[in-house]
């Protein structure tokens, strides 16, 4: 079929998408099961009087068969043995002997994928299923990986299962949008889509940044009319939902937060305002979701094809009670079967009350340690507790080589936080600057903690 | 002596796609005719230090050759020289039918020099019938032809039966891995241009 020939029953692609840019498929290619009802929904939201400037179009590419498959979790019986058998045949491992068990595999990290991602993609992979996946890192360099269309579609059903675990039923509702994925940043892909495996109900990805909307009241009018059943986002965009004009526009069954840590005060504010579960998901793009929590306790490791280890610097498992690097073996994406992938994030592996495994004291990217005035080491998790206790919804705390500390906090009691940091760190100069929103801390994922002090194992070097 | 893997890497870097070549190939000369032509290569073509580029220009090959920087390596020069001879022979003897000079001549020369020669010493194409058959098949495929009387399925099967690369385990493995890397890179580039899929949450 020619790229822009939708056939006599369907309109042409919308002209305002960037010419020659990223919206290049036909609607039939985006949603192979598209019917007149689905087309009507697309048209309704694309052409909505208060719609933002849509910058993209994308679908789930699911046939009826694919959508049915994506709605089912992958079976777990024997999956790890099969997964390791596939891994042994990867270019990365096929010249290595002795990889009999999981523990025999070396750990790998983001740099390994960036250097040679093909070495981690099965030689017999069905590349027809691949879509472009990109993972941003703290350094800014993007990791490009092959995502799997069906695995991407299965993520929706994971969200649905997590909502059900909170006792909330999320079924297709003809009067409401299924989902609104919200961001709040300078530039973003925004689009209307349909979820093939959810009665083809519509979803949107929207940017709450005011500049993206035709008028000041537009975003609230659009969301009120859309009435999304579930809203997903990150702390920056979810915080924006608390704005006066939006707080009454949505009545979600649940909220999902991802991409960066959701601070307790922000969770509390969202729960208080929307009276629904607020589910924080932890995972990287290349690992898919790893764990989730609906409170401020440990993240529960998800029950799909994943094995989580927490490792020390020597690669061995950390002793009970200690924090180590989260290392995952994941069999959800057939195009990228990861084995012992070090995430760069740190946590303590704990046993949940029901016997399941969880991740507590989760800290991203580096388990940053600060230097107290006396030269002792103060782990960042200690700072986290005080920052949250005094209402900060987000923060960036930086210690310079001279031990002085600068903290930028979003919300919270700046004076109390300053005193708390001073108590933790002793007689070091501490300045606290308060901004109103998490967004003002910086775009992307601002590193929460930075320390330029050189330290040895026992303290300041 | 250049590492055979390096030569194979140069060939793969030209973007030569075997599947695409098979798909696009059209009926060409008979294998026996091409093999016979190869066996008649004049000795000056295979002499040490022969100026392969000058010979190529003489027979009208003006497109750049990926093998040019490596013509100081004897097996590369001889592989290329065989390809140039096939073109030259059509002016000196009866043209093949259809003429090989009307095919993708530069690509054919590079295929013999960089893809085949590292796995199959060109001098053996004179003495060994099976190696000569293999060289003839290479020359035809990368000129854009199927052997006369063979369809793509049959031709590919017969090719696989004589492919020297398969017998060289290290080269075969290298070839497989490099082809895979290129396939992934191409697929990701095409996927980027093509749209991803809808995302339901932030990661």
Image: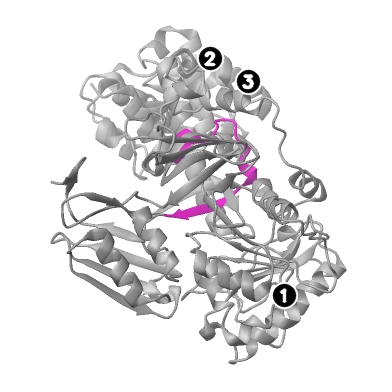
* Whether residue A136 is situated above or below residue A16 in the rendered picture: above
User: Is A164 contained in the magenta span?
Assistant: no
Image-based side of A195 in relation to A235, left or right:
right
Q: Is residue A69 above or below residue B201?
A: above
Q: Label 1 neighbourhood size at 10 Å, few (<14), some (14-19), many (20+)? A: some
At which x and y percent is residue A4? 69, 66
Q: Residue at x 29, y 26 (%)?
A: B77
Q: Nearer the viewer, residue A22 or A267?
A: A267
Residue B157's label in the rendered image is 3
**Residue A251 to residue A198: above or below:** below
Q: Which residues are magenta?
A: A117-136
State which quadrant residue A197 falls in.
bottom right
Residue visible at 20% across and 61% down?
A426
Look at mark 2 in the image and give the residue it sits on: B162
What chain is tagged by disc 3?
A: B
The number of discs equals 3
Residue tagged by mark 1? A251
| Mark 1 and mark 3: Cα distance apart in space | 63 Å
Asked whether the beta carbons under mark 2 and mark 3 sit within 8 Å of each other, the answer is: no
Residue at point 69%, 87% (across, down):
A221
Q: CA distance from mark 2 to mark 1?
A: 69 Å
Secondary structure under the numbered disc 2 in the rendered image = helix
Q: Secondary structure at mark 1?
A: loop
Is residue A125 located in the magenta-colored stretch of the structure? yes
Nearest the viewer among B22 and A458 is A458
Are tags 2 and 3 found on a single chain? yes
Q: What chain letter is assigned to the residue under label 2?
A: B
Colour scheme of this structure image?
A: one colour
């Amino acid at each position: 079929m020619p790229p822009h020939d939708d056939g006599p029953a369907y309109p042409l692609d919308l002209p305002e998408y960037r010419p020659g840019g990223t919206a290049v498929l036909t609607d039939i290619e985006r949603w192979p099961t598209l019917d007149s009802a689905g087309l009507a929904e697309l048209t309704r939201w694309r052409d909505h009087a208060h719609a933002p400037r849509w910058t993209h179009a994308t679908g789930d590419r699911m046939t009826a068969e694919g959508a049915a498959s994506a709605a089912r979790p992958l079976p777990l019986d024997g999956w790890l043995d099969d997964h390791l058998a596939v891994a042994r045949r990867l270019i990365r491992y096929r010249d290595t002997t002795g990889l009999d068990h999981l523990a025999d595999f070396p750990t790998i990290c983001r740099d390994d994928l960036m250097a040679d991602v093909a070495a981690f993609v099965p030689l017999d992979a069905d590349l027809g299923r691949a879509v472009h996946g990109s993972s941003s890192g703290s350094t800014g360099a993007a990791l490009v990986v092959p995502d799997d269309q069906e695995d991407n579609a299965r993520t929706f059903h994971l969200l649905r299962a997590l909502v059900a675990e909170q006792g909330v039923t999320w079924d297709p509702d003809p009067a409401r949008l299924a989902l609104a994925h919200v961001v709040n940043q300078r530039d973003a892909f925004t689009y209307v889509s349909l979820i093939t495996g959810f009665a083809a109900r519509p979803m949107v990805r929207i940017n709450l940044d005011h500049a993206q909307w035709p008028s000041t009241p537009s975003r609230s009018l659009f969301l009120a009319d859309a009435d999304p059943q579930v809203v997903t986002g990150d702390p920056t965009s979810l915080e924006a939902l608390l704005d006066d004009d939006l707080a009454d526009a949505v009545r979600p069954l649940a909220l999902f937060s991802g991409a960066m840590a959701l601070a307790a005060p922000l969770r509390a504010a969202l729960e208080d305002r929307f009276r629904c579960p607020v589910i924080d998901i932890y995972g990287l793009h290349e690992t898919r979701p790893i764990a989730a929590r609906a409170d401020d306790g440990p993240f529960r490791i998800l029950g799909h094809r994943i094995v989580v280890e927490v490792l020390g610097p020597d690669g061995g498992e950390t002793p009970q009670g200690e924090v180590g690097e989260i290392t995952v073996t994941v069999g959800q994406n057939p195009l990228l079967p990861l084995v012992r992938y070090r995430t760069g994030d740190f946590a303590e592996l704990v046993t949940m009350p029901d016997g399941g495994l969880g991740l507590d004291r989760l800290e991203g990217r580096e388990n940053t340690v600060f230097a107290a005035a006396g030269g002792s080491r103060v782990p960042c998790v200690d700072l986290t507790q005080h920052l949250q206790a005094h209402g900060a919804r987000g923060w960036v705390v930086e210690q310079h080589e001279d031990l002085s500390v600068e903290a930028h906090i979003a919300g919270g009691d700046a004076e109390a936080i300053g005193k708390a940091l001073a108590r933790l760190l002793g007689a070091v100069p501490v300045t606290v600057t308060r901004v109103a929103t998490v967004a003002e801390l910086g775009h992307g994922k601002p590193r929460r903690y930075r320390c330029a002090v050189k330290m040895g194992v026992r303290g300041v070097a | 002596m250049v590492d055979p893997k390096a030569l194979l890497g140069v060939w793969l870097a030209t973007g030569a796609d075997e599947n695409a070549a098979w798909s696009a190939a059209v009926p060409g000369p008979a294998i026996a005719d091409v093999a016979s032509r190869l066996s008649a290569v004049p000795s000056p073509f295979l002499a040490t230090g022969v100026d392969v580029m000058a010979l190529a220009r003489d027979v009208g090959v003006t497109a750049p050759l990926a093998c040019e920087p490596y013509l100081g390596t004897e097996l590369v020069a001889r592989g290329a020289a065989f390809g140039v001879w096939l073109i030259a022979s059509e002016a000196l003897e009866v043209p093949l039918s259809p003429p090989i000079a009307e095919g993708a001549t530069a690509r054919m020369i590079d295929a013999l020099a960089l893809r085949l020669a590292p796995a199959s010493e060109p001098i053996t194409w004179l003495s060994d019938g099976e190696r000569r058959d293999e060289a003839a098949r290479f020359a035809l495929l990368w000129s854009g032809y199927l052997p006369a009387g063979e369809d793509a399925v049959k031709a590919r099967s017969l090719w696989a039966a004589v492919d020297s690369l398969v017998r060289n385990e290290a080269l075969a493995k290298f070839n497989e891995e490099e082809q895979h890397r290129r396939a992934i890179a191409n697929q990701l580039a095409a996927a980027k241009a093509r749209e991803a899929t809808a995302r339901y949450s932030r990661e």
